[in-house]
Amino acid sequence: MLFAIPIISQLEAVMRHVLNFFHTNFGLPWAWAIVATTVLVRMILVPLTVKQIHSMQNLQKFAPQMKEIQKKYKQDKQKQNEELMKFYRENNINPAASCLPMLLQLPVFISLYYTLKHFDANFHPGPNENLSFLHFIPNITVGTTQQWGGYVLLVVYVASQMASSLFMAATADKTQRTLFMIMPLFFVFIIARFPAGLVLYWVTTNLWTVGQGLITRRLVAKTPAPVPERRSSRTPPKDDGGSGGNGAAPEAPAPEPAPSATQQPPRQVRRKKKRTSRR
Amino acid sequence: MLRIPATLGVGLVWLYRATFGALFPTTCKYHPSCSEYAVQALHRHGLIRGSLLAGWRLLRCNPWSRGGFDPVR
């Protein structure tokens, strides 16, 4: 662990400068400087995460076949995973999740932690320094549970974490999904000791994830709508499917499973065409 | 000789798994997953080569890569 310490102190220095930049140049209070930093980090990561969400939605089309594989190798998890990966290869699927985008957030997180821990020593805040956030957290550098507002923040954290895992936990496996949903309830106890500013970072990044998920979902829901139209014009007998798709597709993501059975083939063809044209 | 530093590395992987990895849930696009791959690589090739292999794997585990079955050699 010793070799990592100079790296951490350098990371901390970078974070200090970024926070200070938002604080002095934009006149933001420290808490909002943290929010701004979070937004900046997530904006940099947008190309990575958008690609991730798109491939996750692409993955959902293959859910029935993947469930079959999971059923087939229920006993042997190892074999199940290997078979799933083979299935990905054969069908040209790019699995949604990947480690790098998430791991890129790790240094940000660590540096913010140390910056907040050493806040007094680095910034020498006076007695009138505004360290509060939205009037309910008096001091973002102090442990979350040492202030009553921290408990509110923790509740918001749990809610936002659950919402974001709904979007980002990119597995079809139901038990894993529920595990991801329950986990924040346990992590609250660890997080409670962290400075409130760090929880603020977390909540912000979760909310960003949710927002991004909602936007990309809507964009994806809109784009396939014209496809069934064209298909139905070519094949007139299937007229009821085309008109139904027009009305339902752009608005609600919920009724997707029903029309997906009829829309599946054209969508697949589209993706494949795109891929070949890229190469 | 190979064992002690490698075990240290494995310990770090477990630390990551218990903390950050659990807090930010994602599933890896490879099999074995990146952290599992790191543990295997450390056991098989020692700290230095193992870490390099694990690092290279992490870089490969990006949204543009294909993913799939990719064991430690």
Image (spheres, grey):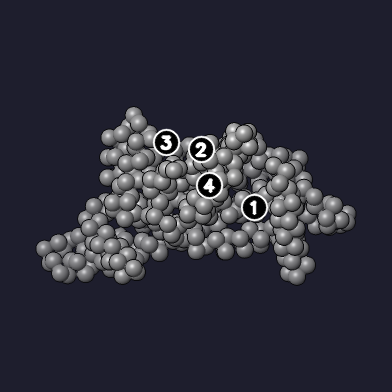
Q: Nearer the viewer, mark 2 or mark 4?
A: 2
- Please name the residue shown 72% across and 65% down the image: A22
Q: Nearer the viewer, mark 1 or mark 3?
A: 1
Q: Which mark is residue A107?
A: 1
Q: Is residue B1 above or below residue A205?
A: above
**Upstream in the sequence, badge 2 or badge 4?**
2
Three-letter amino acid code at the position of disc 3: Thr
Tell me where residue A157 appears, x and y as whole percent: 60, 46
In contact (CB < 8 Å): disc 1 and disc 4:
no
Quote the CA–CA distance across marks 1 and 2.
Answer: 28 Å
Q: Which residue is mark 4?
A: B54
- Quadrant showing the N terminus of chain A: top right
Tell me where residue A149 appears, x and y as whole percent: 71, 45
Tell me where residue A250 appears, x and y as whole percent: 34, 63
The local secondary structure at tag 2 comes to: helix
Q: Which residue is mark 2?
A: B44
Towards the viewer: B62 or B6 = B6
Q: Which residue is mark 3?
A: A175
Answer whether residue A40 is visible to the viewer in this image.
yes
- Please name the residue shown 46% across and 61% down the image: A50
**Upstream in the sequence, badge 1 or badge 3?**
1
- Please name the residue shown 49% across and 60% down the image: A48
Let me know if marks 1 and 4 both belong to one chain. no
Let me know if marks 1 and 3 both belong to one chain. yes
Three-letter amino acid code at the position of disc 4: Ala
Res B12 → quadrant: top right
Res A268 → quadrant: bottom left
Q: Is residue A160 above or below residue A69?
A: below
